[in-house]
Image (tube, helix red, strand yellow):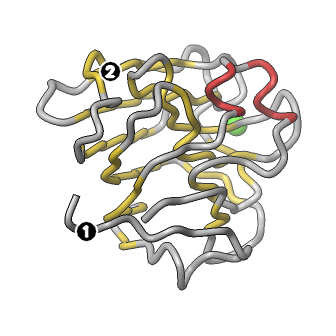
Amino acid sequence: MGVHTLKMTSKDFEKALLVNKFELSIRTEATQGLLLWSGKGVERSDYIALAIVDGHVEMTYDLGSKPVVLRSSVHVDTNRWIRIKASRALRDGSLQVGNEAAVTGSSPLRATQLDTDGALWLGGLEELAVARRLPKAYSTGFVGCIKDVVVDGVDVHLVEDALNSPKILHCSAAK
Ligand SMILES: [Ca+2]
């Protein structure tokens, strides 16, 4: 379905996470746009994010020491469905797009916990101030289709689980 700034979360309280695991399929022609964001919503704090930057998927996270950016070499602005698998365990991140080998990286220094407000955003952020230090793509809403979202091994129901009332356009299944 076409997604515009969905706020997803099961419990709305602060969490300190040691592990994150996200899987989703996207279809888009956009070269820029935020796919997913989880963080504390204030400047200079922890976050983890997936975005399309110049037609490539980037995963970036900051556990409190310094941001890490993992960038896939696969072009995703092809209007074809493609699967994205992104995970982080302590300081180590992994991003796999389509059939490519996973791109990996590691956060420097000692921080190992992602401190968040418990919310997970899909397709954009309502509060964009946090994206100021990041490339413009992170403050750009995603235009395209997202389906089959799995967070920490659990299927996410984009309509039923949304906390806000986003405008959602259903993508044609035939395309
Ligand atoms: Ca932290």
| Kind of residue at badge 1 | Ala
Near-viewer residue (151 or 145): 145
- For the point 50% across and 18% down, the residue is 69
Q: How crowded is mark 1: few (under 14 residues within 10 Å), some or many (20 or more)?
A: few
- Point out the residue furthest to the bottom here: 160
Near-viewer residue (131 or 9): 131
**Residue 84 in the image: above or below residue 155:** above
Image coordinates of residue 79 in percent, x first then y, are 29, 40
The N terminus - image quarter: bottom left
Q: Distance between the residues labelled 1 and 2?
A: 27 Å
Quickly name the residue at label 1: 173
Describe residue 147's horizontal placement relative to residue 12 as left or right.
left
Q: Quadrant of ligand 1?
A: top right
- For the point 40% across and 51% down, the residue is 21
**Residue 173 in the image: above or below residue 41:** below
Describe residue 63's horizontal placement relative to residue 132 as left or right.
left
Q: How crowded is mark 2: few (under 14 residues within 10 Å), some or many (20 or more)?
A: many
Near-viewer residue (42 or 4): 4
Q: Which structural element holds mark 1?
A: loop
Q: Earlier in the sequence, mark 1 or mark 2?
A: 2
- For the point 29% across and 22% down, the residue is 75
Within the image, what quadrant is residue 166 found in?
Answer: bottom right
Q: Which label was assigned to residue 72?
A: 2
Describe residue 24's horizontal placement relative to residue 33 as left or right.
left
The C terminus - image quarter: bottom left
**Residue 59 in the image: above or below residue 114:** above
| Kind of residue at badge 2 | Ser
Callout 1: CB less than 8 Å from ligand 1:
no
Image coordinates of residue 44 in percent, x first then y, are 84, 27
Image coordinates of residue 111 in percent, x first then y, are 63, 28
